[in-house]
Amino acid sequence: MNTATTPAVSKTYIAEWIKLDFFNNSNLKTDIQKRISDNIDVVFINALNNLKGDNKNNSGIPFSEITLLAMAYFYSEIFTDEIKNEYYTLEMVKGFLDANNLTPYTAIHEIDVVFCTMKDAPYFKHCWLIIQSAWFFNSQYFGHHQHIDYVNHYIKTGEKLPTDNYKFDQNYLEKKYNDIDSRKEKRIPINGFTLVNQWYYGILFLVCNELKLPTKNFKNSIKDDREYNPLVKTSRQLRPLAPFKIIECDIKSAFPTFLDIKAGATLKDHVYNNLMKSKGIKRGEAKILFNTICNSGKYKSKQETTAFFIECGYTPQQCEKLISLTHNSNRKFIFSMTEYEALAITNFVTKNDLKQGARLHDAIIFIDDKTKPQLLQVPPNCDFGIKELNRPQVKESFAVGTKRLKFAYINSIPKGLNLISKVEYKKPEIKGIANGFKFYLGKYEYHSASYNLNDYTADYSRFIGSCNVMFSTLRTLNNRPLQPFERLFILQHIRQNSNYIFNVRALYSKYKQVNSTFLISKSRNWNVTENMNFKRNIDFITARSEAEKLVNIQCNYKDLFDLLEERISNNDFGYIYELSFKGRKDLNKLSFAIVQYYNLICTGHHRKQRKQVSSNTLYNSSIKDVTIKSLSLPKQRQNAFVQKKIKVYERELKAFNRLVNNRPKAKQMLFILIDITGFKTDIRLSRNEFLMNEIKTELLNIMDIENKTNRANEFNELYPKLSTQQIPIINDLNTIFDTDIQNSIFNQIDIQQANDRGELFFREYLRFHEVDEVNETPISTGELKEKYKFPEIDFE
């Protein structure tokens, strides 16, 4: 089994006190097993409630210890498979949680390992968030960033690096430079690791808010209606870099919105655009300029500020009201704005029932749990926007695991989807049904989208080829593209029930557009009538062979029965030679024994006799033949020859009469076949149990079965009578029907099963579920089918 092992790399800006005590690929078996106990859930949640934060008193439980407790809780309460020695690493635990994610959260980076079953334990979400965070802190994605490089270089040297290659917001970088200068002027100590420390504690603070854990060990204060927590202190450039997907809901054009309330204007959506046009600047620069002018009452005259507001689009009357805010000597402008900010954030949280997340100044940030706020307009006249701060990284991978699957055949298409995955065309006449299998007299064509997931020899090329055929066939059979949730459900089913180790997200993106509509025809002479599961492929082959054997035996009985019925009805008791039994002779002993015994008692021969040529074709009578032949002999021998021939004729006549007397036995053989097979005959015959028992004894002797006292009972044990089920008599027709529509047959089967029952039933099924009928495209089976060539995938 391959694991995505990432070697630990040195982090230039990670302080020693936030480093974990182990790496992602460190084997922690001893540490984990020491912490597994009967009350691990209590120990784990108590530790989480006392998570160490950025408080100066250094109180709380270190994150390394909480990570070990999370892994102990995982293997004690969540993981259900066999635990191997190599599983005791942080990387493997994250891989298991990525493969079988029972939370609504989304990991940004996924590790592809073998799929294992898990229990949705009470603290599954807690464990998931802790493991994801711990792996992220140890990974190559944490501790370094271009923004950190530029800021730390300026802290150390006082020199600004060239911004030509800077990939992020340069205005924000300049703002950080100014913040550093102001701190130097105030002689506030500057730590080159501050940005990473704030990044680290910001993620932990977000986790605590998501899980509703105490944040007493974090620096968190409220001043002038604004909250100052680790997330607010985290650089805006680093905030989106988290181990899980996060969402930010912020007030659109916050300051213009609040000024509209004060001035009675409606310019909140146009202020920045007006500045961009008049000043020839970008939106980010327009926003900075607007906020700077509004907060510059000490440095700008009323006339200058008024001219600026006019340029933004406000009327002179509105400008007078705004000047009263910007040039108020008793209260700073920013305090008026933060009051509106707090009110808007409170109303937004209350109306959307947001119980998790942390507040920024004019926004709420929370871990995405796939339930986004719906009420985006709240008092006072504030519109909120929703923004995904990060997106999962898609990385394609493939491997084949070695775990033993439950069944020999696992369908690649899960049950429960409203999809047609198989279409069968005109079938030959049914040959027979046995042990859940149905056999036909010939092969029939069908199209099936599914394939077997239990294939240890598959490689990436063949796996992708099978998926291509599956999705293309589904599109063609359903005459529509698959819905996104259908594609995702199928891929998750394959990932869960196979040994294929791949990234579901990457493969889902690969099959967003499936435009091919080719089909591959298949043919076979059998089908199944019930759901059967086999642990090994040889078990399936054996069961099918056994069923086919029983069907062949039944067909041989039927052919023999029909021939005997025809012979008896026509009073023909000649030698039977026209039968050809299917299957091995040792499997059809009774059929061969009946034919042999029938020929013996009706013709006196075990084998068919050669056709003899008459020496005297002019006479058919044996008496005339004897008389004529005797005349050619001397007189002394004529009488003796005649007497001898007469005795021979008498013996033949006695033998013939004996054969004629055996015909009732031959008729009783029909009843023996009726008892064994349940066939019915229109011939009026009387059963004779005595003759039947005698026949059974002779049949056992012919089959060389060990002699016993009661041969008839032995025969009945070997070939029991077919039981007939009595149909109960219904007296009250008003109470036998279930009129509840929920129990309708149309609610008991899926669309595939409905399609298999024929066109009329399928149309009624669609009408019952109020599904519009799709345009059917007939598929010709007589044309030459397109041969599919699996593509060659280049991993480079």
Image (cartoon, rainbow, N blue to C red):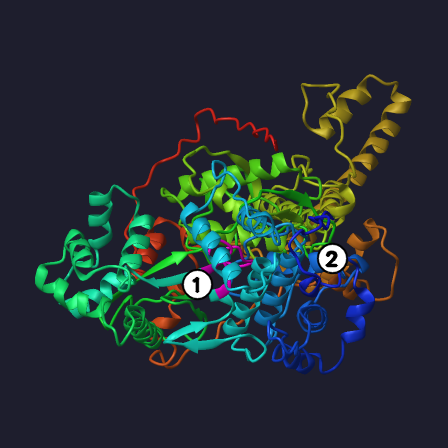
Where is the C terminus found, in terms of image quarters? top right
Residue 288 vs residue 112: left or right? left
Image marks 2 and 1: residues in contact by CB distance under 8 Å: no
Q: Position of residue 438 (x, y in %)?
A: 57, 49
**Looking at the image, which is closer to me, 496 or 723?**
496
Q: Nearer the viewer, mark 2 or mark 1?
A: 2
What's the mark number on residue 160? none
> Could you say which quadrant of the image residue 708 lies in?
bottom right
Residue 506 vs residue 459: left or right? left
Relative to 582, residue 283 above or below: below
Judge whether residue 532 can be spotted in this image. Answer: no
Please tell me which residue is depicted at 16% across the width and 51% down the height of the picture.
311
Q: Which residues are magenta?
A: 233-246
Judge whether residue 136 can be spotted in this image. Answer: yes
Q: CA distance from mark 2 to mark 1?
A: 31 Å
Q: Position of residue 131 (x, y in %)?
A: 64, 64
Q: Position of residue 192 (x, y in %)?
A: 61, 56
**Looking at the image, which is closer to me, 480 or 525?**
480
Label 2 sits on what residue type?
Phe
**Looking at the image, which is closer to me, 585 or 78?**
78
Q: Position of residue 341 (x, y in %)?
A: 32, 71
**Looking at the image, which is closer to me, 36 or 212?**
212
What's the mark number on residue 23? 2
Label 1 sits on what residue type?
Lys
Question: Is tag 2's residue or tag 1's residue first in the polypeptide sequence?
Answer: 2
Does 240 appear in magenta? Answer: yes
Disc 1 secondary structure class: loop
Does 458 appear in magenta? Answer: no
Q: Most prominent secondary structure in the magenta stretch? A: loop
Residue placed under numbered mark 1 in the picture: 370
Relative to 232, residue 637 above or below: above
